[in-house]
Amino acid sequence: MQKNWIGRSNGAEVDFRVEGRDEPVTVFTTRPDTLHGATYMVVAPDSDLAAELIAGQPAEIAEPFAAYLARVQATTEVERQSADRVKTGVPLGRFAINPVTGDRLPIWSADYVLSDYGTGAIMAVPAHDQRDLDFARAFDLPVKTVVDVFQPVTGVIPVIRPGDELPELESVDPAVTGVALTGEGRMVNSGSLNGMSKTNAIARMIKDLEAAGTGRAAKSYRLRDWLISRQRFWGTPIPIIHGADGAEIPVPEDQLPVRLPDSGGLDLKPKGTSPLGAATDWVNVPNPVDGTPAKRDADTMDTFVDSSWYFLRFLSPNDDGKAFDPAEADKWAPVDQYVGGVEHAILHLLYARFITKVLFDLGLVHFTEPFNALLNQGMVLSGGAKMSKSKGGVSLSDELNRFGVDAIRLTMAFAGPPEDTIDWEDVRPGGQVKFLNRVLRMATEVTSAPEVVWASGDAGLRRQTHRFLADAPQLAETFKFNVMIARLMELANATRKAIDGQAGPADGAVREAVETIALALSLFAPYTAEEMWERLGYVPSVALHGWRKPDPMLLVEDSVTAVVQVDGKVRDRLEVSPKITAEELERLATSSDVVKRSLGTRRIARVVVRAPRVVSIATE
RNA sequence: GCCCCCGUAGCCCAAUGGCAGAGGCAGGCGACUUAAAAUCGCUUCAGUCAGGGUUCGAGUCCCUGCGGGGGCACCA
């Protein structure tokens, strides 16, 4: 899920000489192979480069740019992120030189290029990039095809069979169709690259650029920022004071932490600047160095910054001297299991990982990942919507009052896998109330004393109890709470039968089973479990009682059912010892009358034996 | 547009590639009761969304499609 928020692109940096500028402009591209098809260049309107290139340009160019820049800056984040909006931009009246073709490329400014990614400038290859093509068609810029996607590259991509009619390149001209050719193909119109595949052409182009000193292989990284760019009044202040001379001075340690001002009377509506800046009394402070007028940094950090290291702070919560104790971190961290909703899975987790890596690089922690395992629990909906009293639906507090916290917890745990979203209308706590009453009653019905000898009790119930003791821990540890509770219900049903049947309420196995139910139930319904524990004659608390070890002797099955399949269909079932050998099981299966009958005259081609579970006979 | 997850009984959901049903809800029948509730017992119900493939054997693995849910979205 973090794929959309973090990324690494392999490609190249290419230097473009710009007329009237000493230094070349460097762009990042993942497709250096298409350099021959670059027909213009774009710089982000809000970049320093755009400001520099526009400086000194005549009014008929500078004024439209100024207007465009103002419009872009007024555009909200939401509008700007809409991918299907029409491309806009203005020319800067400057020109770059394509390093391989020598062509003169007009430089435009457009907001589809982002100032904070790569170098804030791109080479535009409209024939092979949809965004560039959209822009080129909107402003009538040239389109030059340099990859022929209808020429097979490897015989696999694209799939073209003998006799297939190959479309003419002209008929799919991107300038006409509006569809960029982004697929694989062979290079054309590209000088020494002609005929090469994409992969080879990229490698060759990088080599050529490096030889000519006009480019190099490069990687570009991105990490979507939500920590600083999302400004809120109540965020964490950045403890920096800006001097009148532009100096950035840390707030003196004895003045930390920086506290937020009272928000009373302040206008905190979004204005495109930091809301905290409205608190002028708070912002204006003397320079800690020389006492001259200075300003606090008005940007705040999102709460995700704080929560990105709380798992370290929690290890030494009373330490006034430092954020966390590296020795404690070495001892306890990383965290074994992280449980959270999906919204935390993408943002909180992303930044916690990032900050952990920073702390690792600083040598403050000795692990690179903060959390070893992740579980994203699902939501509880009611009638398809979030539980909300105001919407007229059921509210959690009403449900708690009506059914009790034990039944509510049990309902949630039993409803399905924890990562699934559940609908309260589908599960309802009524059945769990019944179950809790049922087991509580059983605890009351047990007549034996705690000292009763289990071993002499009902053997069938004992086996089931110990099977449960053996299976439940791993069900709990793999978060299969719904299955564990189902198994618990099974054990309760068997116990009920034992009490009402041969064994009776005084049987040792009955007490053993009911105690086991109380132990397991303490995970989900602690109040009921403690009540059961007391009725069984113990002092609290069941929560302090350890899990019991199953008796291996009671886990051994007397016999198991082996299935005999003929051509995949079950034809016979055999009761066999769990320790039966493959040879013996095969002999039993092939000598079975039922199997012989279903085989008829067909000859056996192959027999697969998986003792003691299954024998599969395939015929010719 | 791209990425991820999920489709099993009327409903929620189980099933290391090996007998599709463990558990619950709802429904039906019965016991107890003057009656009802509560309780206890018994019980009906699907061949696993569709179509291909791999395999001795597929709910489970692979491909395509349909349906549902979620995430992201101009990253050069």
Image (cartoon, rainbow, N blue to C red):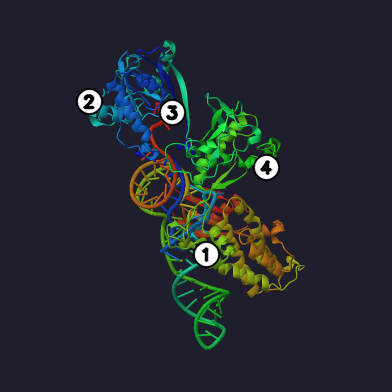
- Chain under numbered label 2: A
Cα gap from disc 4 to disc 2, whole angstroms: 67 Å
Q: In the image, is residue A222 above or below residue A574?
A: above
Residue A467 position within the rendered picture, expressed as x and y whole percent measured from the top left: 64, 59
The answer to whether the residues at label 1 and label 2 have Cβ atoms under 8 Å apart is no
Look at mark 2 in the image and give the residue it sits on. A170
Q: Amino acid at mark 3?
A: Tyr
Asked whether the residues under marks 1 and 2 belong to the same chain, the reply is: yes
Residue A520 location (% of width, % of height): 64, 60
Foreground of the two, A452 or A22 = A22
Pointer 3 and pointer 2 on the same chain? yes
The alpha-carbon separation of the residues under discs 3 and 4 comes to 37 Å
Residue located beneath label 1 in the image:
A399
Element type at marker 1? Answer: helix
Is there a contact, CB below 8 Å, between mark 1 and mark 4? no
Residue assigned mark 4: A315
Density class for disc 1 (Cα within 10 Å; few <14, some 14-19, many ≥20) is some
**Picture coordinates of residue A154 (x, y %)?**
36, 25
How many residues crowd mark 3 within 10 Å: few (<14), some (14–19), many (20+)?
A: some
| Disc nearer the start of the sequence (3/4) | 3
Separation of marks 1 and 4 at Cα, in angstroms: 36 Å
Nearer the observer: mark 1 or 2; the answer is 1
Q: Which residue is mark 3?
A: A117
* Amino acid tagged 1: Glu
- Do marks 1 and 4 share a chain? yes
Return the x and y of residue A116 as percentages of the image width and height.
Answer: 44, 28
- Camera-side residue of A159 and B53: A159
Mark earlier in primary sequence (4, 2): 2
Q: Nearer the viewer, residue A341 or A264?
A: A264
Q: What is the CA distance from the residue labelled 3 to the residue labelled 1? A: 50 Å
